[in-house]
Each structure stands twice: as structure tokens, then as C-alpha cells.
């Protein structure tokens, strides 16, 4: 019943929470934030990013701001059970995927690639994370298994694949691919089989969402 958004006024960008009809906006920040971050699935907290100042959480009413990291981290993404946050960080040199508890404890690095990783997306059961890496030359989609502690490559299209998202039941993914020269939306089974093209036009298609 609420929505979180960024309001920009010149160079300043502040985060607000409002009712779904746009009324009762509440300012959540007193300093410019870099990203609106991500809303916990239980609705209790919002993860925010302060430029060069790490990841924070805050209640939707704007109080109880808690700092979770103190390194240049970005793109916080809550797990489906709201107990963990996956994020990106360059703290060890390359942009890699990390995960931590919702209170900032037990921070650990998941990927160890020479190329940057990005576009992270939790599986509905919280056991896997989709991401994009250029570790093999072009942006391809990978799945990291949290229990096994290892990744497997999902796409091998010899073209840029990006913006992967899970279907609600976790059996499929949708993503953007430049396989045919321009960005189109593709679907694929989560086991890597049965890829199919969902859009076919001369425009640029992006940002799939189930």
C-alpha cells in the first residue's frame, strides 16, 4: 500500500515514501542518496545507498537509520524472506557479489571473477542468485547456488545478455539479449534449456518483469 521513490531537485536527490495513491509523502533522507535501493519483502525496512558511504536500512517512516556497510557498495537486493541482502561491491578490487544478514552481519563474498558482475536477482526460494558477468568475454547470465557456493553459466549467446529476472515459480527466467543485433526480450528455462524469443521489433526492449 506504499511506494518508495526518488525526487530530484537539481543536483539533489532525496528518497520519499508515499501512499499508493501518491498522498502523505514522507521524506526518508536528509542527505542526497545515490539509489532508492530495495524494499524488504515483509515491508518493514528499505535498503538505501549513500554515495561512497555504504548501504543503510531505514524504517518506511524515515526513522531508525542503520548503517550496514562502510565501503563503496551498491545495488542492495533483499532475499525473499527479508533475512539477507545481496549487493555489489568493489571492496576487493573488481565489482563482485556479496551477501549479508539483514543487520549487516556475516558479510561474505560470493563471486571471484576478473570481470565485473552485476544485475543480481534472487530466486523465489532464496537458494540461488541470477547475475550477469563478462568473465567469458561478453555479458552472459549465470546462476550462483548459495548452498553449493558455485556458479554455472546459463546463456552462451555470443552476444550481450542482461537484466535477468525469475518467474514467480522459479522455473523460468526472462532477460534482454542483443543476439539479433538489437535488444529483445527472451525467455529460458532455469535449467538452461528451451530458450525462446518473446519480442521481435526494431525498437529497444528492456527491463522485463514477471
Image (spheres, rainbow, N blue to C red):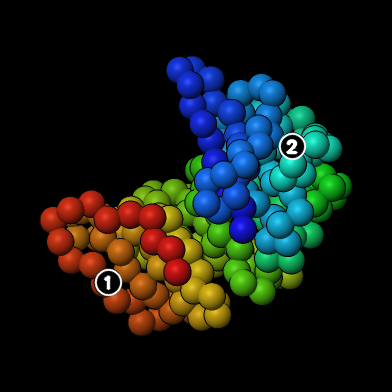
Determine whether 149 is above or below 112 in the image: below
- Separation (CA) of disc 2 from disc 1: 41 Å
Q: Position of residue 132 (x, y in %)?
A: 48, 54
Q: Position of residue 209 (x, y in %)?
A: 43, 63
Determine whether 173 is above or below 13 in the image: below
**Pointer 2 or 1: first along the chain:** 2
- In the image, what residue occupies the spot 72% across and 45% down? 60
Please give the label number shown on residue 198.
1
Q: Is residue 53 left or right of residue 203?
A: right
| Label 1, residues with CA under 10 Å away: few <14, some 14-19, many ≥20 | few
Q: State which quarter of the image contains the N terminus.
A: bottom right
Q: Position of residue 21 (x, y in %)?
A: 52, 51
Q: Secondary structure at mark 1?
A: loop
Q: Which residue is mark 2?
A: 62
Image quadrant in which you'd find residue 14: top right
Q: Is residue 89 visible?
A: no
Give the residue furthest to the top. Answer: 11
Q: Secondary structure at mark 2?
A: loop
Query: Is the Cβ of the residue at disc 2 closer than 8 Å to that at disc 1?
Result: no
Amino acid at each position: 500500500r506504499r511506494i518508495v521513490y526518488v525526487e530530484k531537485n537539481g543536483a539533489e536527490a532525496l528518497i520519499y515514501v508515499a501512499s499508493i495513491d501518491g498522498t502523505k509523502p514522507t521524506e526518508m533522507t536528509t542527505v542526497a542518496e545515490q539509489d532508492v535501493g530495495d524494499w524488504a519483502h515483509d515491508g518493514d525496512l528499505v535498503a538505501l545507498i549513500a554515495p561512497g558511504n555504504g548501504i543503510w536500512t531505514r524504517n518506511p517512516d524515515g526513522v531508525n537509520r542503520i548503517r550496514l556497510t562502510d565501503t563503496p557498495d551498491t545495488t542492495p537486493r533483499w532475499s525473499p524472506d527479508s533475512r539477507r541482502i545481496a549487493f555489489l561491491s568493489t571492496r576487493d578490487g573488481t565489482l563482485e557479489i556479496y551477501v549479508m544478514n539483514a543487520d549487516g552481519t556475516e558479510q561474505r563474498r560470493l563471486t571471484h571473477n576478473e570481470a565485473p558482475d552485476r544485475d543480481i536477482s534472487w530466486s523465489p526460494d532464496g537458494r540461488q542468485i541470477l547475475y550477469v558477468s563478462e568473465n567469458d568475454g561478453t555479458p552472459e547470465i549465470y546462476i550462483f547456488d548459495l548452498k553449493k557456493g558455485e556458479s554455472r553459466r546459463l546463456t552462451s549467446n555470443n552476444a550481450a545478455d542482461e537484466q535477468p529476472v525469475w518467474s514467480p515459480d522459479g522455473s523460468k527466467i526472462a532477460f534482454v539479449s542483443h543476439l539479433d543485433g538489437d535488444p529483445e526480450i527472451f525467455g529460458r528455462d532455469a535449467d538452461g534449456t528451451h530458450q525462446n524469443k518473446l519480442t521481435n521489433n526494431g525498437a529497444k526492449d528492456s527491463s522485463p518483469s514477471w
